Image: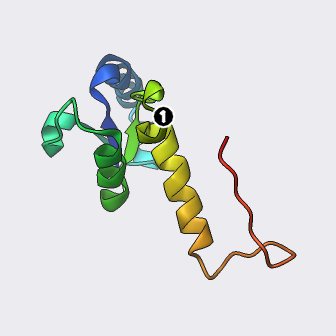
Amino acid sequence: MQVVLSDHNCEGQAKAIFDLLTYRRVWLELVPMELVWFRDVHLAATADDEIVWRFCQEHQYILLTGNRRTDDGEKSLEAIAAFESIDQLTNSHHWQSETGKCRFELS
């Protein structure tokens, strides 16, 4: 079963989505999902984006959020996710460009 973690700032939207999915049970039978809140997994609403990102990655949760703090620069969820994704790609032995060289730039 896939777990979806709702950020504290979009709990209402998450509940509405899951209410719609459970209205016609077919959807959750096709793709079993469970909705959880920060409090359910003992994360503070004020948790740093990096802590939230790593928690979701370690537990294979999908994070439903509105990009928590875009004004935090390198500490924003967007920057953390981009850095972690690039780090995973560059450390993978399964991926190479056609030239055998990889180049990534963050703007």
Q: Is residue 1 visible?
A: no
Seen from the viewer's position, the closer of residues 5 and 77 is 77
Query: x and y percent of residue 87 in the render?
Result: 54, 64
Seen from the viewer's position, the closer of residues 106 and 6 is 106
Quarter occupied by residue 42 = top left
Relative placement, left or right, of 41 versus 93 is left
Image vertical order of residue 103 relative to residue 9, above or below: below
Relative placement, left or right, of 80 versus 103 is left
**What's the coloring here?**
rainbow
Residue at x 59%, y 59% (from the top left corner): 86
Query: x and y percent of residue 22 in the render?
Result: 35, 30
Task: Name the residue beneath numbered marker 1.
Answer: 73
Where, quadrant-wise, is the N terminus in this rendering? bottom left
Seen from the viewer's position, the closer of residues 1 and 47 is 47
Image vertical order of residue 79 relative to residue 15, above or below: below
Query: x and y percent of residue 107 in the render?
Result: 67, 40
Q: From this viewpoint, which residue is outermost toward the bottom?
A: 93
Query: x and y percent of residue 34 in the render?
Result: 30, 43
Relative placement, left or right, of 78 versus 10 is right
What's the residue type where badge 1 is placed?
A: Gly
Seen from the viewer's position, the closer of residues 92 and 16 is 92
Relative placement, left or right, of 85 versus 42 is right
Image vertical order of residue 21 relative to residue 28, above or below: above
Disc 1 element: helix
Q: Is residue 65 visible?
A: yes
Residue at x 87%, y 76% (from the top left corner): 99
